[in-house]
Amino acid sequence: MSLLRLKSRLNDENVNLSNIFGVITKITPTTIEVSGLRASIGDVVKISSKDKSKTGLAMVTQITSQNAYISPFGFVEGFKIGDFVYESDQGMSIPVGDGLLGRVVDPFMRPIDGKGEMHLSDSMPIMKAPIDAMKRGLINEPFNVGIKAIDGLLTCGRGQKLGIFAGSGVGKSTLMGMIVKNTNASIKVVALIGERGREVPEFIEKNLKGDLTGTIIIVATSDDSALMRKYGAFCAMSVAEYFKEQGKDVLFIMDSVTRFAMAQREIGLSLGEPPTSKGYPPSSLMLLPQLMERAGKEEGKGSITAFFTVLVEGDDMSDPIADQSRSILDGHIVLSRDLTDYGVYPPINIQNSASRVMSDVIDQTHRQNAMMFKRLYALLKENEVLLRIGAYQRGNDKDLDMAIAKKEFFYDFLRQDSDENFSFDDIKSLLAKIND
């Protein structure tokens, strides 16, 4: 380089000739305190030991007048006081592209399926404002998931957000697999957040039968750091938004919102936030709409139809995360442990479930048949004890007599094998038999 070019470079105020870095002054299991780092909230930084033997990425989560506090994406083991923290040029974005289709990746879009590297030419920000309220398209067409109980009685709309509420071991993963396999969405994004590592290959092989056509699976298992689990959900939503921007209809499934909220609970409590109900800090509840409201239908673009699973501990629907999720979502599908005792799978509790847009996406005949099914089924369940002990005499209640006669029809309609798939028209025809 000539002396004139060197002089010009030295005089250029826009050129940064040195890496801006800070020094680690305190380390806890979840947070690192750094002095001398000029950073903003949300900046991605690089941690490096003095001998360069260990490096890692972290995010700035809190700033004081003296120090910055960062949460690592990995683990703090191996770092020590005096190690350096550098500004990173990675930023809050991830690489995206059609190369993701059919792959299993981590939140940074690095492949973990052993199928080699991917060629991703575009990028998307991890954090993004939800769709503007006045730019949202009306949800006015059904979204077929091929499941009789959902399409017939809890019909979803294209661009709707629904929750699947279930306790442990009730059949949540099986239902997720059925939705992914049966839907006609061109792109399917599955986010497995905070689940056991064993469940990832099981979900692919057992529930999806190894078919990942048009499917992207983003994985952040329970042994990943809290920050990785938190931003794994946002990264998955960014991938769905990338395809929505191209005008495509995207199915987004996340398992589970509860693990996502637990990750933020770890981060929030470590930063000194006050705990509220069940130990969740205010930021845990604040994050839910930031994630969920990014799904939907946007005018002039595609749509994201989202299913968020919520783990209801002890089948307690008053859990703060379940309660907050119900208030944000456009409907909820509740899985019942009692129905599994009757051998009804998927065990969808029709009485406690609802789709808030169902009346906007179905015709009048379908609506009337669904209302009759729900009314007679509820009547049968209310009088179940009387029927079992023989205290009811037929002929006393015309509607109850009709419900008793339809008992087998109810359970046949609610039952569905995991390999079965029904078209929307077939489901409406089956439901119409309630009038026979």
Image (spheres, grey):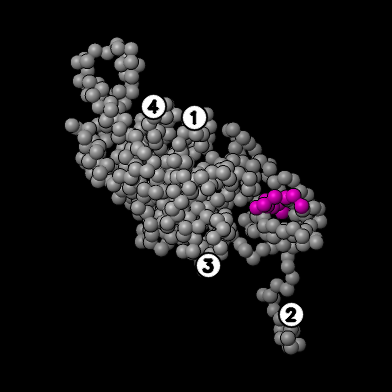
Residue beneath label 2, please? 10
| Residue 253 within the magenta-colored segment of the rendering | no
Q: Earlier in the sequence, mark 4 or mark 1?
A: 1
Q: Quadrant of the N terminus?
A: bottom right
User: Is 157 positioned to the left or the right of 108 in the image?
Assistant: left
Circle 2 Cα neighbour tier, 10 Å, few/some/many (<14 / 14–19 / ≥20): few
Q: Quadrant of the C terminus?
A: top left
Residue beneath label 3, please? 119
In this rendering, the count of numbered labels is 4
Image depth: mark 3 or mark 4 in front: 4
Kindly report the distance in space between the C-alpha atoms of the residues bearing marks 3 and 4.
49 Å
Q: Earlier in the sequence, mark 3 or mark 1?
A: 3
Q: Earlier in the sequence, mark 3 or mark 4?
A: 3
Front position in the image: 296 or 339:
339
Q: Residue at x 61, y 50 (%)?
A: 228
Q: Position of residue 154 (x, y in %)?
A: 33, 39
Q: Position of residue 121 (x, y in %)?
A: 51, 68
Asked whether the beta carbons under mark 3 and mark 4 sit within 8 Å of each other, the answer is no
Residue 195 numbered mark, or none: none
Residue 315 numbered mark, or none: 1
Circle 4 Cα neighbour tier, 10 Å, few/some/many (<14 / 14–19 / ≥20): few
Task: Specify the amino acid type for callout 1.
Answer: Asp
Magenta part of the chain: 66-78
Residue beneath label 4, please? 342
Q: Earlier in the sequence, mark 4 or mark 2?
A: 2
